[in-house]
Image: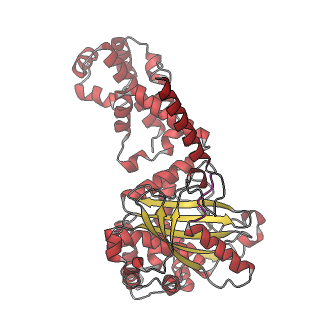
């Protein structure tokens, strides 16, 4: 995060470097003419030091500007957009430090090619405004990139979970129950209250809240045992890891910083790892992967063994598959939808190694209805309507992306959401390559349906698609442009 003091130093350093270069002065020459050391001038230009008034006056005189110009927020046309950026909230919407960029490195980037950087930043700002992207959008995108860089496996958190289990003698416990989790919180004087939130209609959409002042952890009504366990384990993580910059409510209403969102992710990761102990979970997954036939019940049974939600189980797969099986070409999707309205939205996604299809879009296009993520929602809705729904629907599909060589094994689990008439599905998609074929024997099971799919109907050229929800307007636009290009060539 770039603080106000950082901003002041960065802006001064940017101006000094720009003016020195305009004057054709070297570091050595500016240092000699101002009576400062070479290292001190360098520290000013890199935003590490902010000199006293007499030194600023000396710099202003040699650089041919007045004192006020150097210490103000005004600059020339090339620098002004960068200074506005440095002094804006947008600069802190991107967690530079988590990607190895210090304020000094940013300053160097800005000052070396200010016109290009200005154009690039202006483009980002215009895109964010056009698509109504908030800071939370940037935080989410940055968090997903951060997970991708680590293959979504975090050794330090896994080690912290092992240490916690050892401290409390939980090494041999497979299924951790609610009373056991509550014991940890009451042991550190945190009271669990399941009644108070229920009486407040405004909090109906929230699942939990921690009052740090009163040391009370409130849990709302309507939670399953598995959901309650996650909430309790997540609060234990915040306390055990001594995380102070954190959200206190679930679902998060607003992220004030990237660190808050990152810390929430770390606590959630800890909670899932605590409920699904790494070594045992790996062995359980391995026993399913070596089967030669697709078995939907095996995956649902995995949820039951640990008493976790399908989303927690699928999320845990994204941790262990890259680390323990070398399967790192994968994506995770959570889709919510109203089948009666034929409306669907990707509410959470993760892509490891590349931006796999499908992915969320901000253009309100219609996602391909051939995805198993959506067909399983429809199957679940049918079961609910006929009053035959008993447990989550688990389905697999080999998705062949139209006009590409990309084939994915997609495993989807769907169930009713809390909101009336809404369903929710979580899907893991695994690129079918040599690694996957060697690790998962059942991929070749002929009973797994194969479908040609696309990302959205608007961009899909499968003209005989019976599931199409919208015309292929983007394809038609491309064809029209091709005709224009051909006609123009005839004029040459």
Q: Residue at x 38, y 39 (%)?
A: 103
* Left or right for 194, reference 134: right
Q: Residue furthest bottom?
A: 172
From the viewer's perspective, is residue 336 above or below residue 22? Answer: below
- Can the viewer see residue 235? yes
From the viewer's perspective, is residue 271 above or below residue 69? Answer: below
x, y percentage for residue 138? 52, 48
Main SS class of the magenta portion in the image: loop
Front position in the image: 262 or 190: 262
Which corner quadrant of the image does residue 133 belong to? top right
Front position in the image: 186 or 451: 451
x, y percentage for residue 357? 48, 58
Classify the position of the N terminus by image quarter. top left
- Can the viewer see residue 245? no
x, y percentage for residue 217? 61, 71
Q: Residue at x 77, y 66 (%)?
A: 201
x, y percentage for residue 324? 33, 73
Q: Which portion, as a residue range, is magenta? A: 365-370
Front position in the image: 216 or 350: 350
Q: Residue at x 54, y 56 (%)?
A: 455
Tell me, yes or no, whether the highlighted magenta stretch contains residue 7.
no
Number of marks:
0
Front position in the image: 186 or 314: 314
Q: Which color mode does the image show?
A: secondary structure
Which corner quadrant of the image does residue 147 belong to? bottom left
């Amino acid at each position: 995060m770039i603080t106000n003091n950082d901003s002041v130093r960065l802006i001064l350093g940017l101006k000094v470097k720009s003016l020195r270069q305009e004057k054709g002065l070297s570091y050595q020459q500016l240092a000699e003419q101002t009576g400062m050391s070479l290292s001190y001038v360098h520290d000013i230009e890199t935003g590490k030091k902010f000199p006293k008034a007499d030194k600023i006056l000396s710099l202003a005189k040699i650089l041919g500007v007045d004192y006020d110009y150097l210490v103000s927020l005004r600059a020339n046309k090339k620098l002004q957009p960068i200074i506005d950026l440095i002094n804006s909230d947008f600069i802190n919407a991107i967690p530079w430090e988590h990607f190895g960029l210090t304020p000094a490195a940013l300053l160097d980037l800005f000052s070396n090619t200010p016109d290009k950087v200005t154009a690039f930043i202006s483009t980002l700002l215009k895109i964010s405004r056009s698509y109504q992207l908030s800071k939370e959008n940037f935080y989410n995108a940055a968090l997903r990139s951060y997970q991708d860089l680590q293959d979504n496996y975090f050794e330090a958190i896994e080690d912290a979970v092992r240490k916690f289990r050892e401290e409390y003698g939980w090494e041999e416990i497979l299924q951790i129950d609610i009373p056991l989790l509550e014991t940890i919180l009451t042991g550190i004087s945190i009271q669990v209250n399941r009644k108070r939130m229920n009486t407040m209609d405004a909090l109906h959409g929230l699942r939990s809240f921690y009052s740090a002042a009163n040391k009370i952890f409130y849990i709302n009504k309507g939670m399953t045992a598995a959901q309650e366990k996650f909430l309790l384990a997540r609060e234990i993580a915040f306390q055990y890891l001594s995380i102070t910059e954190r959200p206190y409510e679930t679902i998060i209403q607003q992220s004030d910083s990237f660190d808050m969102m990152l810390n929430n992710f770390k606590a959630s990761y800890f909670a899932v790892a605590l409920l699904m102990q790494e070594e045992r979970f790996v062995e359980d997954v391995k026993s399913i992967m070596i089967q030669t036939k697709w078995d939907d019940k095996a995956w649902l049974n995995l949820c039951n063994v640990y008493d976790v939600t399908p989303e927690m189980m699928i999320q845990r797969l994204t941790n262990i598959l890259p680390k323990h099986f070398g399967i790192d070409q994968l994506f995770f999707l959570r889709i919510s939808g109203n089948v009666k309205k034929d409306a669907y939205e990707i509410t959470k996604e993760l892509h490891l190694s590349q931006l796999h299809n499908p992915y969320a879009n901000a253009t309100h296009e219609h996602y391909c209805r051939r995805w198993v993520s959506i067909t399983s929602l429809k199957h679940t809705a049918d079961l609910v309507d006929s009053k035959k729904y008993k447990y989550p629907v688990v389905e697999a599909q080999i998705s062949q992306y139209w006009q590409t060589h990309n084939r994915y094994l997609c495993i989807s689990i769907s169930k009713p959401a809390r909101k009336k008439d809404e369903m929710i599905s979580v899907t893991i998609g695994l690129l079918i390559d040599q690694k996957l074929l060697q690790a998962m024997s059942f991929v070749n099971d002929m009973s797994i349906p194969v479908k040609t799919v696309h990302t959205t109907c608007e961009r899909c050229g499968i003209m005989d698609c019976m599931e199409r929800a919208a015309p292929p307007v983007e394809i038609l636009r491309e064809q029209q442009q091709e005709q224009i290009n051909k006609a123009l060539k005839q004029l040459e």
